[in-house]
Amino acid sequence: MTRRSAVLHLALLAGGIAAPFVFPAHAVQFAVFWIMVLFALTWDTMGGQMGYNSLGNILFFGLGMYICALTQIGMVYDIAQYTAANGAIRVDFTDRQYFVGLALGVVLAALGALIAAALLSWVLFGLRGPYFAIGTLGAAIAAAELTNAWEYVGGGSGIAMPVFPGAPGMRERFFYAACMAGAAACYLFLRWLYGTRFGLAINAIRDDEDKAEALGLRTGRYKTVAWSISAFFLGIAGALFGNMTGFIEPLETAYPTLTFGIFMVAMALIGGKGTLWGPIIGATLFYTLREVTWTYLLGWQYIALGVLIIVNVVYFRQGVLGWLRERRPAWFA
Amino acid sequence: MWDSLALLGAAPILNVQLWLNGLSVGAIFALVAYGLALVWGVTSVKNLAQGDLVMMGGYLGYLLAEHGIHPLAALVPVAALMFAFGWVLYRLVIRRVIQLDLFTSLLATFGLAITIQQSLNLVFGPEVRTVQSGFGRLEMFGGMVDITEIRLIAFGLCIVLAAALVLFMKRSRIGQAIRATAQDARAARVLGVDTDRVYALAFSINAAICGAAGVLIATVWVIQPFYGIAYSVRAFVIVTAAGLGNLPGVILAALGLGVAEQYSGFVLGAQFQQATVVGLLLAILIWRQLALMRDRRVLQ
Amino acid sequence: MSAALIEVRGLTKAFGGVVANRNVSLSVAPGTITGLIGPNGSGKTTLFSSIVGQHPIDAGSIRFEGREISRLSVQEIARLGVLRTFQQTRVFSKMDCVRNMLIAAPHRHSGWRDMFRRDPRERVEKAERLLELVGLRAKRWEAAGSLSFGQQKLLELAMALMNEPKILLLDEPTAGINPTLINGLIGCLERANREFGITLFVIEHNMRVIMSLAQRIYCMSRGELLASGTPAQIRDDPRVIDAYLGVH
């Protein structure tokens, strides 16, 4: 790592750690920012690096959310009773129960999402391009609808999450740390991964999958592993997010295909797909813009999102990083 | 679920009801699917905003109804307005993404979808709305089966519209130009066809079709800003199942889907209806892929 | 006599109503250079595509090292050591030449763990050596898409060599190449055959090239095998002359 790069990383790390202490009122927003980074990075692994643009990655987010919730609750209560009571049941988690449940929940969420991706790969990787996009979108919608209809996990009424034991300030900082750790882990892992043969292989699949196959590349294996990696981190994100919001339900919180699901794509594209920092820059710009305009553009923010996607796709396909590369090639030497 | 199935067996007349409802709504699906196939076949763009264009047409019909214009009379003006809107959309957005890869054009239409549905939400609010047609109900078989007269009228109108479209495509010069471009754009261009205009026409005709379908849906059922995606998904299921250029297939698949949905809603419950349709979409995509795999090709 | 490396028997392949290959039988002996000639539309490229598994065949059998491969996928056949180059070059245009070469490294023995390793030094050196062999060393860090057509062909050949195939099916390797570079290319092919022991099966329109390169030549016409023999025999075969000059 060059000296300039090391300094940059350290500065970000310091800033990241300090943020919730300097701006305690915004700690939750910052935590969600890290989730956005995770969204953009994991989407880009599939779409930017490998050329398989998924519109349904949110499926793993929601799956992780539910697996974690059910683990946390299931360890202490009978799930069916809990969900049927709809929050009327008195929930008492000891500190220990809470943290053990959360830890186990996150692990199971990650693994569950990974396994789901491996299975789904087998089904969906025969499709390419727009068909893959539509197929994944369909899968995510199906997951949302099926969860919505499944009474055991609360159906449309959702699940009330266990309450974090500890002072209110502690809660925000804890989840902020967890989200930042998740995003950092994802970044470091992908940074390493793209430097191995794996990175080269998925780029080859993106550039000319038929040629890659004609050279004997085991494309099926690489595709499945790539998606499983994305799913793994998305599962973690879902588990954490579910606990942060305190209440989860399928259509708007767990599987929001038309909001978070499409944010993933937008952020990676805005920043510059197919690069490591592009999605991060995109997430930063996008999320900052969104938070700033939320209060001023109430009612218009999603229209702005739609327009943003169109403008990006039509006029700005290279994204910020691509644009910078053209204007200041010296920075990238 | 088993109770519902048993009921269907015990009172066969219920099947008639399901079929009637299914066919009448399937006819509207067929129109929307035809429009999707038109744009897809001519420009290769898969329009994810299809359902939202339908909703927009529905809301336009609603607006006109608020001003005293009967929905059936609103069909033509709404279609015309939507045609113009489609033309504008083509010039502003679609034209620039047609040459790009298929995912990019899909994403552009997805952006359109979000813009349209959110705009509708902003203007009209999230409540479901419907338009009164002032027609009554028709009862048959001693009251066990009923159908609103507007459904029958809508069904008839769909047939008329579909026939008009087919005739237009086959007989008119514009229709021929469109079909020629769909077959081979480069050859068409060499022969002097203005392909850019053909693309614009295809997209605008589609928008007009969606508009008309939307008005019908507003009277036959309900409209809501976010219901669009349901129609988009159904149109995709139908076109993917029937294949492009297979109009009889599209009609059959659409009617079949309409009926299948009614049955799934009745037997499995309304909450599974959307899941069933999406499940069908996945099943059809996978089935098509398996069929291609025998030839060692892929769906792209 | 050593067994044929590739043995094609009774191969028939039709696309829609057009029969591209009808009852074609031929064999390629290991270590040799075999040529495939014939007028345009005689089904040569289709034959290659059938061999590498790009499409299923309608009838017949294709054996590689005695093993039936007509039902295998493109990937599997490539890993067995059967590679082909394309008439219109196919390279990974956004990557530089070296990375193109690294991707082309053989995959037949790579396991799950190999996916996550960095490319070892020896592999990079081998890539650079092969690029030097085809004369692309100076351009090795440039994006493959920025190379000229002829240079891309050379890159594709280098990539094929990197993959350590047992047999290489070359589809018109000299087409579109500057005549001054053709000799260099031929030299590379001969070296690949002599030093690396790679069997070559070459489609060619350039008669001078194929007659001097190949030890055995097959001639196809209108989907069928017309004649076969040594270059001298083929050159004087009236049927071959007819096929090229005659009225179809």
Image (cartoon, helix red, strand yellow):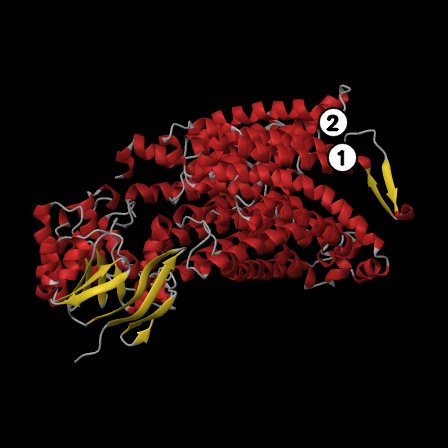
Residue A246: % across, % down = 67, 48
Question: On what subunit does the disc labeled 2 rest?
Answer: B
Between the residue at mark 1 and the residue at mark 2, the CA separation in whole angstroms equals 9 Å
Residue B30: % across, % down = 64, 41
Residue B23: % across, % down = 72, 45
**Cβ atoms under marks 1 and 2 closer than 8 Å:** yes
- Mark 2, secondary structure of its residue: helix
Q: Residues within 10 Å of mark 1 (few under 14, many from 20)?
A: some
> In the image shown, does A122 or A312 lie closer to the viewer?
A122
Up/down of C109 relative to B204, above or below: below
Question: On what subunit does the disc labeled 1 rest?
Answer: B
Label 1 or label 2, whichever comes before in sequence order: 2
* Residue on which the image places disc 2: B72
Residue lying furthest front in this view?
A: C247
Could you tell me which quadrant the N terminus of chain B lies in? bottom right
* Residue on which the image places disc 1: B153
Q: Amino acid at mark 2?
A: Leu
> In the image shown, does A93 or C238 lie closer to the viewer?
C238
B201 relative position to B59: left or right: left
Residue A280 appears in the figure: no
Residue A281: % across, % down = 43, 38
Query: Residue sitting at 55 percent across and 54 percent down?
Result: A235
Query: Residue sitting at 79 percent across and 60 percent down?
Result: B5
> In the image shown, does A46 or B257 lie closer to the viewer?
B257
